[in-house]
Image (cartoon, coloured by chain):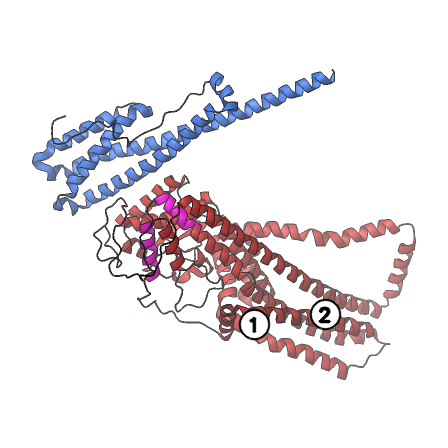
Amino acid sequence: MPARGFLGATDAAAPAAGAGRSTVPGNLSLPASRTRPAPATFAEEQARHRAHARWATLACLLAAALAGLFLSLVLLLFAPITLGVLLGIVGRVLAAFELHGPLLEAGYRIATGPERNAAIAAAATVVILPVLLPPPLAWLWLRRLMLRTAATPWPTTIGVRAPRRDAEEHQFSNLVEEMAIAAELPAPLVGIIDAAEPNIAIFGTAHDRAGIVATRGALDRLDRAETQLLVAQAIGAIGNGDLRVSAALLAAYRMIALFLTLIASPLSGTARRSTWTLVRAGFGRADAAALDAAFAHLDTRLTGGEHMLRLLVWIPLMLVVPAVAFALVVDNFSVDKSNPLGALIPALLMAGGAAVLCYGLLRMTLSLWAVTILCWPLAAVWRARRFLADATAVRLGGDPDALAAALAHLERSCDIPEKAGLWSHQFLSKPRQGGRAPNILGTLEPAMTRRLRRLEALGAMPRPPAPVQDAIRAHPVRLGVGALLLIFMLSNLRFAGFAIAFGLGALLLLSTGAGLFLFLTIMSL
Amino acid sequence: MTTAQIIGLAALALLILIAILLYNRLVRLRVGVKTAWAQIDAQLRRRHDLVPNLVAAVRGYFGHESAVLERVAAVRERAVNAGDTPAQRAGAEQALGAALGQLIARVEAMPELKADGTVLALQEELATTENRIAFSRQHYNETVGRYNGAIESIPDMLIAKPCGFRHAQFLELDTPTTVPVVDLERAA
């Protein structure tokens, strides 16, 4: 039997089958003015938190709609610019080979002749079909990519192993089976991570293909009752459909990361390899390890400090290159109407400048959007779901006090295993302060005070969260300038709002200005 | 055919369709009850299989009190041969549960037994089996409640009687009035 943890040295060793504690742990004191929350049943708590989760989901949908609207607007402005430049170039080339005359005559003949309707229908099909067909195909491909079915529900980059024939791990498997029977779900696969910090996570995309993973620290430091309630929380989360929610969360972020990787492909070898692996995976032809490595690369595009730093490099590029191109064109190239091909070079220079501008804008906008607009409603949904999982755990396991003890214990000395990356939200607990670079998904963990208070309403003993006494393992802090900017914006929402409005306005202005400018320049050449 | 005939035929077809749907629903619920019973049966048999192992592991330590172990084995035999329906099994399983509880209490009181790895592993297995029995029983009773409720409600009642759907029995493992008192101190 494992030794009991640090909390509650005054408690006697708890009996094996999960009886509740009857004394407040002696080494924690409560302020006298504290009022107990109104008692509630777990059914009421579940209904309440389900309603909260629904409201948060609505906010998510609204943020997603806004983001989609904005991106469509940007692309709407971007497309005519590109089209105008392309048509201008094509026209110049045709004129250089004396082809524009016969082509125009042929066009005039068709437009006024009897084959007009057929020609219009053919032109419409040729133009519209290639535009209409790719989006549903792309959606199918992306869906297959995001809902990949691998041999194990967890990614291979985290370092999960099968449980050994060990007393602790066998007990953990037993607990998972018990709670699965209680929840009337098929038992999830069990995995263990060899890490000292106590934590439990759920993985998978559906409740019948789920996996539950615990760290060795969780098994060693928590006793049977506490582990049972944590397992109940995890299985309750699986039963409530949190796997689908987390898959949607990750898919939303990975979509943006995918765009960013696609955009960065011309410049970065790893980005190209990742994109190629993901393309193959969408058709079912990539092996799990390569796919997980590609996803890990995607995740670093959103969380790594170096990437944010490199984004800032684009700002001077975006200002300097178009200006240089414009200056070159205006000063050195006189417009010579007799030689149409001679106007090609300034047109290409202008196009290059505009491309750099739009490229940089798109990259920065996507990153900023991911961080500031999409971040908080998704985090709000996940937080509401954590409360729902707590209430479901009490319903399944029956002892709110054990859950409160386990959570308080977890908060004292918890951490996410090293390689979790963007999967870290699926772990039960995460340090609210510490030496890691901040996670892009924001505060995914509800405040422990509130969680303990809701558990108190369900019948746990009053218990304040233990202060974080242990030194949380200091990780090498990889904060670049870009990440510092990110932290500042995330911590100061008003500034973020102002920055967004400013960024939006600047972007629209720049796009419109660039489009008009290019249009006029090409027309006049 | 006249309009009335067509309407009559359509109504008849609709009634037949509804009857089929109701029958399928009752069949689904009955299969659910059978599945839940199979699940709790598996857990009860798992407990039956654990008892000889536990008895063998603690036999050496019990010495002169080995009569206690014989009585536990006798209760287990009665549970194994109790039959297949919930009513037959309930009494015997309750007795076995009570006997095991008393045996475990004695085991916990012996300090030399608590250090034995085999006994600890068996205790853990027993604890998890008890929990699984509790949860499966809850699930089984809920399923039986749904099935019985469906049989007794109005539209399904008309289908249930002619098609042979009988009430299912609840499994009550913790009503103290019906448990036969098993005292390990005295002869059975």
Q: Which residue is mark 2?
A: A512
Along the line of sight, the residue nearer the viewer: A311 or A273: A311
Residue A111 seen anywhere in this rendered image of the structure: yes
Confirm whether residue A265 shows in the render: no
Q: Chain of mark 2?
A: A
Chain the render paints blue: B
Q: Based on the displayed image, in which of its 4 quarters is residue A445 positioned?
A: bottom left
> Is disc 1 in the same subunit as disc 2?
yes
The residue under the point 23% across, 31% down is: B96
Q: Amino acid at mark 2?
A: Thr
Q: Which stretch did the figure color magenta? A: A388-413
Per the rendering, the colour in which chain A appears is red
Is residue B158 or residue A194 the one in the foreground?
B158
- The residue indicated by pointer 1 is A311
Residue at horizontal 59 percent and vertical 65 percent from the top:
A366
Compared to residue A127, the image places residue A338 above or below, namely: below
| Residue A120 image point, x, y percent | 83, 52
**Magenta region, mostly helix, strand or loop?**
helix
Query: Looking at the picture, how far across and down is residue A162, in whole percent?
Result: 35, 50
Q: Is residue A6 left or right of residue A475?
A: left
Quote the CA–CA distance across marks 1 and 2: 22 Å
The number of numbered discs placed on residues in the rendered structure image is: 2
Q: Residues within 10 Å of mark 1 (few under 14, many from 20)?
A: some
Give the quadrant of the C terminus of chain B: top left
Chain for disc number 1: A
Tag in front: 1 or 2: 2
Q: Amino acid at mark 1?
A: Leu
Q: Tag 2 or tag 1, which sits nearer the N-term?
A: 1
Q: Is residue A396 left or right of residue A506?
A: left
Left or right relative to A212: residue A336: right
Q: Quadrant of the N terminus of chain B?
A: top right
